[in-house]
Amino acid sequence: MRIGHGYDVHRLVPGRKLILGGVEIPHALGLLGHSDADVVTHALMDALLGAAALGDIGQHFPDKDPSYAGISSLVLLGKVMDLLHQAGWRVENADMTILAQQPKLMPHIPRMRQNLSRAMGVPVSAISVKATTEEGLGFTGREQGIAAHSVVLLETLDK
Ligand code: MG
């Protein structure tokens, strides 16, 4: 078994979509980034790559590469899963925590879990997404950005 952790932050700005776990969420602000800036999926991919000691998403999907401009992070997640399978790993479970003051994320969590489950080929019962505020404190509390953590457990494919 292998454990991995991922963490990511994106800045909230006007004029961008807010996409979390592959769900477009109606909000006045969206996340800034080269791809769709899906901070939840980014944290998850880094946790997966970390567990397998396969580097990080910046290394696999450089933000200088125009082919990744505006790309759905769920597509990149599929590529990370291919890398894991090639290296002989499968995912036992994944757990995410989103840190955001606004908007309320609870209604969108079931669709995030479904999207991530589908992109990973892992049962939705093994994919957890949670959200919390930071009580108005720090950059998430001031609504300057959204952060996400992820932990995952991998097992060897032959089990
Ligand atoms: Mg990112």
Image: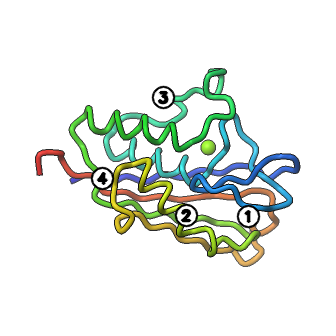
Q: Quadrant of ligand 1?
A: top right
Which is closer to the viewer, label 2 or label 3? 2
Identify the residue at horizontal 82%, vertical 66% (top origin): 142
Q: Nearer the viewer, residue 152 or 18?
A: 18
What is the three-letter code of the residue carrying label 3? His
In the rendered view, tell whether residue 136 sits above or below residue 29.
Answer: below
Identify the residue at horizontal 65%, vertical 51% (top origin): 9
What is the three-letter code of the residue carrying label 4? Val
- Disc tally is 4
Q: Earlier in the sequence, mark 2 or mark 3?
A: 3
Report whether the residue tagged 3 is closer than 8 Å to ligand 1: no
Q: Secondary structure at mark 2?
A: helix
Q: Residues within 10 Å of mark 3 (few under 14, many from 20)?
A: few
The residue wearing badge 1 is 140
Which is closer to the viewer, label 2 or label 1? 2
The residue wearing badge 3 is 60
Q: Residue 17: x, y in percent? A: 76, 49
The residue wearing badge 4 is 91
